[in-house]
């Protein structure tokens, strides 16, 4: 995970973990680390915490996405209208030879342009968060199926990144497009090889 969500602080959000010299090294978004012995249970605990983070992040984004989009559109509209109004002011005041008024409207245009650029930058950052939320949501929805078919070579057909096993810890190494491809492949696996898929479900039970 590369972004905070809700009221979480960077020091509270796990970015990833590594297995080094018999230890699990957990890295948080503020780059602080936490070390613990490498055991199956400890690794499972860390992964469960990361899954909980993912669910919280997806839920938080779902609640805030519409509000953010509305605010960005409204801000751009207001700033654009202000620029047009200021330009009209310059054109009008130029005929009246009012230098002070022209300077004032020029300053207004400058402020409005900065506001628009700031809004666009903010929206661009939110687009990154949107893609991350979509990717995590897709993974959470398909996780059980992915784990049940992880050994099926067809699952990763057409996926650029095949170097690391796909799980909640390695998810950041995969793009949103990779997840879309995996989801499509998973549907084929479940449809064309239902016996193998159902057998794994029974074994898990």
Image (spheres, helix red, strand yellow):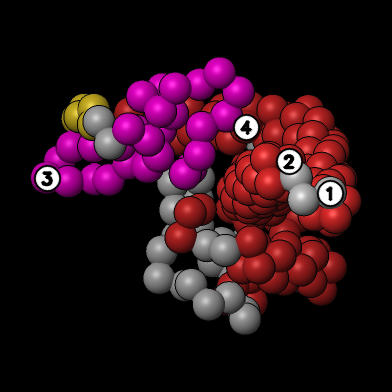
* Residue 193 part of the magenta segment: no
Pointer 4 residue: 57
Q: Is residue 120 above or below residue 31?
A: below
- How would you rate the neighbour count of disc 1 (Cα within 10 Å): few for under 14, some for 14-19, many for 20 or more? few
Q: Is residue 5 above or below residue 127?
A: above
Distance CA(mark 2)–CA(mark 1): 9 Å
Report which quarter residue 75 is drawn in.
top right
Residue at 25%, 31% (x, y): give it: 32
Q: Mark 1 and mark 4 in contact? Answer it, CB < 8 Å.
A: no
Please give the count of numbered marks on the rendered protein.
4
Q: Which residues are magenta?
A: 1-30
- Label 2 or label 1, whichever lies nearer to me, is 1
- How would you rate the neighbour count of disc 3 (Cα within 10 Å): few for under 14, some for 14-19, many for 20 or more? few
Pointer 1 residue: 96
Q: Mark 2 and mark 1 in contact? Answer it, CB < 8 Å.
A: yes
Q: Judge by depth and name the residue closer to the eye, 99 or 117.
A: 99
SS assignment at label 3: loop
Residue at 58%, 75% (x, y): give it: 159
- How would you rate the neighbour count of disc 2 (Cα within 10 Å): few for under 14, some for 14-19, many for 20 or more? some
Q: Is residue 197 above or below residue 111?
A: below
SS assignment at label 4: helix
SS assignment at label 1: loop
SS assignment at label 2: helix
Q: Is residue 137 visible?
A: no
Q: Mark 3 and mark 1 in contact? Answer it, CB < 8 Å.
A: no
- Label 4 or label 2, whichever lies nearer to me, is 2
Q: Earlier in the sequence, mark 3 or mark 1?
A: 3
Pointer 3 residue: 21
């Amino acid at each position: 995970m590369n972004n905070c969500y809700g009221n979480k602080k960077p020091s509270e959000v796990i970015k990833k973990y590594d297995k080094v010299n018999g230890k699990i090294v957990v890295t948080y978004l503020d780059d602080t680390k936490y070390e613990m012995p490498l055991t199956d249970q400890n690794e499972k605990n860390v992964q469960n915490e990361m899954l909980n983070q993912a669910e919280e992040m997806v839920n938080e984004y779902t609640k805030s996405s519409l509000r953010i989009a509305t605010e960005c559109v409204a801000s751009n509209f207001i700033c654009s209208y202000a620029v047009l109004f200021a330009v009209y002011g310059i054109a009008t005041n130029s005929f009246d030879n009012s230098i002070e008024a022209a300077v004032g409207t020029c300053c207004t245009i400058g402020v409005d342009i900065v506001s628009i650029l700031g809004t666009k930058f903010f929206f661009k950052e939110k687009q990154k968060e949107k893609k991350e939320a979509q990717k995590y949501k897709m993974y959470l929805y398909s996780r059980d199926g992915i784990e049940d078919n992880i050994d099926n070579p067809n699952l990763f057909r057409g996926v650029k990144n095949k170097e690391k096993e796909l799980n909640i810890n390695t998810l950041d190494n995969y793009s949103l497009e990779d997840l879309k491809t995996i989801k499509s492949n998973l549907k084929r696996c479940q449809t064309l090889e239902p016996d193998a898929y159902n057998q794994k479900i029974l074994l898990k039970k």
